[in-house]
Image (cartoon, grey):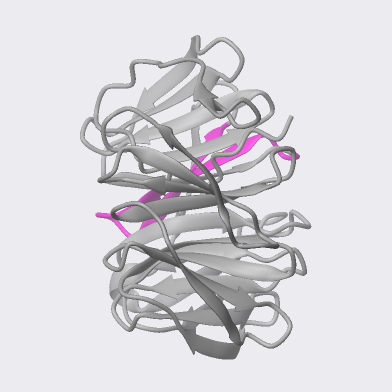
Amino acid sequence: MIDLDRREEIRRIEVPGKPAGVAVAGGRVYVVSPDTKEVRALDAATGDRLAEVTLDGGPIGIAVDAARGLVFVSDWYNARIWVLDARSLAELASLATGSAPAGIAVSPDGTLLASADRDADAVSVFDLDTLALRHRVGVGTRPFGLGFAPDGQLFVANVGTNDVTVLDAAQGKTLATFPVGERPYGVAFAARRAFVTNQYADTVSVVDLATLAPVATLDVGEYPEGIGWSESAGAIVVANWFSNTISLIDPESLETLSEVETGDGPRAFGDFIWKE
């Protein structure tokens, strides 16, 4: 846990199983450990363990619907998303996806859940009121991470084709595709721009949201993965898996504000910025 204003680590919490997926909501941190197949809920302020569950499959991505009190976890091996109770982590239901779902995200208006179905080269979109499948839309090759822009458009990072597909998720329509660096992983948004981590290039691609034209390519640490926007810190935050750091980037000037050391192998696959 890192204080982004002070730019220093304030707490380290033991989480067995090589944690990767993470989501912060309602004062809780939800963490997925793929190696041990465990999902844990931690108190965001103290780090205390509040609940945990072991899931029979391949848990990887995670997202939270705070309004409905639900947590969603993608199952890489069984083409589904678990629906869990946000307090107890009890399993409530499962949703069928395309093959090998990875990244999942809830739309800004809280009406849709989307999953990047890597081996199906598709995205599944679910209605959050009914949990019914609305659309399954083809995208680029091997989509992995994805994120909703503030206006609700869905940006999908395709690691196999080194590009990003933009969808109208509500209508199930493809709007555009634009190139980025090698092995795009995560997407974040700030200052009317999209920021995409490129794992193999050690860079972040910056794209204008209005035109989807490239703005810049920024050097960051080695093997950048998770990426998010901190309004309080005024920074795009990038987790550099192999460098054991996070990079803080000014979204307007595109200058690197700071690099902060972390534990070994930071990943942060999901919505990892505590906004409370």
The answer to whether residue 26 is left or right of residue 166 is right
Residue drawn at x 36%, y 79% as measured from the top left: 121
Q: Pick whichever, 110 or 175, lies toward us.
A: 175
The answer to whether residue 248 is left or right of residue 37 is right
Residue drawn at x 26%, y 66% as measured from the top left: 200
Q: Pick whichever, 225 or 176, lies toward us.
A: 225
Residue 81 magenta-drawn?
yes
Tell me: residue 141, above or below residue 233.
Answer: below
Query: In the current view of this chain or complex, which residue is farthest to the left?
Result: 35
Q: Pick whichever, 145 or 194, lies toward us.
A: 194
Report x, y in % for residue 102. 38, 58
Tell me: residue 170, above or below residue 79.
Answer: below
Q: The magenta stretch spans which residues?
A: 67-85
Report x, y in % for residue 225. 38, 53
Q: Pick whichever, 174 or 209, lies toward us.
A: 209
Q: Quadrant of the C terminus?
A: top right
Residue drawn at x 74%, y 69% as measured from the top left: 192
Report x, y in % for residue 63. 54, 46
Magenta stretch, overall SS? strand
Residue drawn at x 51%, y 24% as measured from the top left: 8
Report x, y in % for residue 81. 44, 52
Residue 130 magenta-drawn?
no
Report if residue 114 is visible in the image.
Answer: no
Report if residue 178 is visible in the image.
Answer: yes
Tell me: residue 184, above or below residue 175.
Answer: above
Determine the image quadrant of residue 152.
bottom right
